[in-house]
Amino acid sequence: MREHKSISIADQIFEQLEHDILIGKYQRGEILTELKLSETLGVSRTPIREALRRLEQEHIIEETSRGAVVIGISKEDLFDMYEIRMHLEGLAAARTASNITDEGLAQMREVLDLQKYYVDKTDEDNSDNSDNIKNLDSQFHRLLYYFSGSKSYYDTLLPIHKKMIKYRKAAMKSHSRARESLSEHEGIYRALEKHDPELAQRLAIEHAQRARNSILEKEI
Amino acid sequence: MREHKSISIADQIFEQLEHDILIGKYQRGEILTELKLSETLGVSRTPIREALRRLEQEHIIEETSRGAVVIGISKEDLFDMYEIRMHLEGLAAARTASNITDEGLAQMREVLDLQKYYVDKTDEDNSDNSDNIKNLDSQFHRLLYYFSGSKSYYDTLLPIHKKMIKYRKAAMKSHSRARESLSEHEGIYRALEKHDPELAQRLAIEHAQRARNSILEKEI
DNA sequence: ATATGTATTTTTGTATACAATTATACCATA
DNA sequence: TATGGTATAATTGTATACAAAAATACATAT
């Protein structure tokens, strides 16, 4: 008796479209019609429609009679999302420090080791690993939220973090910020390991602040 | 050139199912199959599926190979959602105080007048208007979030408020709380009218605290 | 030139058919 | 009785057909 279903075409299309919208491949105002997507992606309209309904529910597209209009994430949205994160992420981290299991710590450790690997690699051969580092950043935060044990914090913070992808990727192009971010993650991890809620909370807030500053400095 | 589409069958089914899940008509663990819903509601599976995808995106159902399992909102979720609201709602209210237009104030005034009408009515004839009062509470908060001018605050707070519907309705059954809640709304409204962010922030936080306490006292 | 009415095209909305997968029931066998 | 296998049923996943609504293009009249 399997618990979860396998990944359907509709799921894949949802993730692809979500990704493409959030990284800005489809820009604000652009209209996606079911027929065009159906032809482009080589599937029928049915799975396309289901993906569009989910994107609509996330408020990153808006259905109109002419098709689905891309909304995307603006600089103002980003600013507000950081404000929200700065008020919630510390609380989530404190809970995680209280509740995380050894298994959870091991999962986060693995993500950090990979993140360290790519940051070091860039140091050595100057290669661009910003995409990998950005994905590992996503995973670190997903685990941080998840092991808080609170569905509400997870459901609130994860979508916000996900929607920042375009700007986080840009931030990770700055290698000094990538290294700094890793070291902040390490600090949070140590606080979780010590099960120190206050420390985890403080470091998580500082991490969000520094991430915000590095992004807001980038473009005026 | 109309801007928005009319309400489709799929939309109606989504709203009906969402409501029925959030008020607890469909309980946690219950399995909703497309075929059964299709027969019960008298429509084909297509609009049902689209509604289910949206509910899945809200994390109030979970798709499995046996059908959609109802998740719903637990007491723990409620507690955490209040904690989140207490940290965000004040910030949203402060922004609303700064940004709200006369037109926005008029809309909120109208909601408050209706809310006062139903509360007074219960005073007079002891009738049960908790459903109407609960709906007007929803509208008041929706407008409060909306006129913050921030898509991120709106998108974050509205789903949380919506998910509390079952517990808010229960709270409004207590007439003393219904009257108290109205008076708190009036206070927030006056702060918005004066464009006083600090006051609006303080009152919004206190309102969330009192709402939480009244609900948490109810059942141990 | 502008406005209006109409035909055409585009696009979404819904129902249905069929495929694929998973769960269930039941029987046979050790 | 327990186990395994096979047929059956239940359920979701996808494609397609057709309906409905809206947008567009275009001709015509003023």
Image: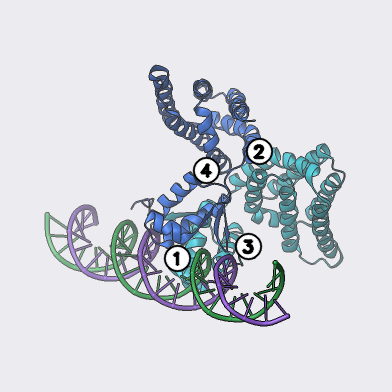
Chain colours: A blue, B cyan, C green, D purple
Chain letter, disc 3 residue: B
State how far apart marks 4 and 1 are (Cα): 31 Å
Percent across and percent down for residue A52 are 50, 56
Q: Amino acid at mark 4?
A: Leu
State how far apart marks 2 and 1 are (Cα): 38 Å
| Residue on which the image places disc 1 | B34
Foreground: A19 or A137?
A19
Q: Amino acid at mark 3?
A: His
Pointers 1 and 3 within a single chain? yes
Pointer 1: residues within 10 angstroms few (<14), some, or many (20+)? some
Foreground: A123 or A85?
A123
The reply to whether callout 2 and callout 1 are in contact (CB within 8 Å) is no
Can you say whether A33 is above or below A198 in the image?
Answer: below
Foreground: B191 or A73?
A73
Percent across and percent down for residue B39 are 47, 73
Circle 4 SS class: helix
State how far apart marks 1 and 3 are (Cα): 28 Å
| Residue on which the image places disc 3 | B4
Residue B106 in view in this figure: yes
The quadrant in which the C terminus of chain A is found is top right
The reply to whether callout 1 and callout 3 are in contact (CB within 8 Å) is no
Of marks 4 and 2, which one's residue comes earlier in the chain?
A: 4
Residue B216 shown left or right of residue A127 in the figure: right
Which label belongs to residue A80?
2
Looking at the image, which residue is at 47% across and 44% down?
A19
Percent across and percent down for residue B46 are 46, 67
Circle 3 SS class: loop
| Residue on which the image places disc 4 | A22
Pointers 2 and 1 within a single chain? no
Name, please, the residue furthest toward the top: A124
Q: Amino acid at mark 1?
A: Glu
State how far apart marks 3 and 2 are (Cα): 27 Å
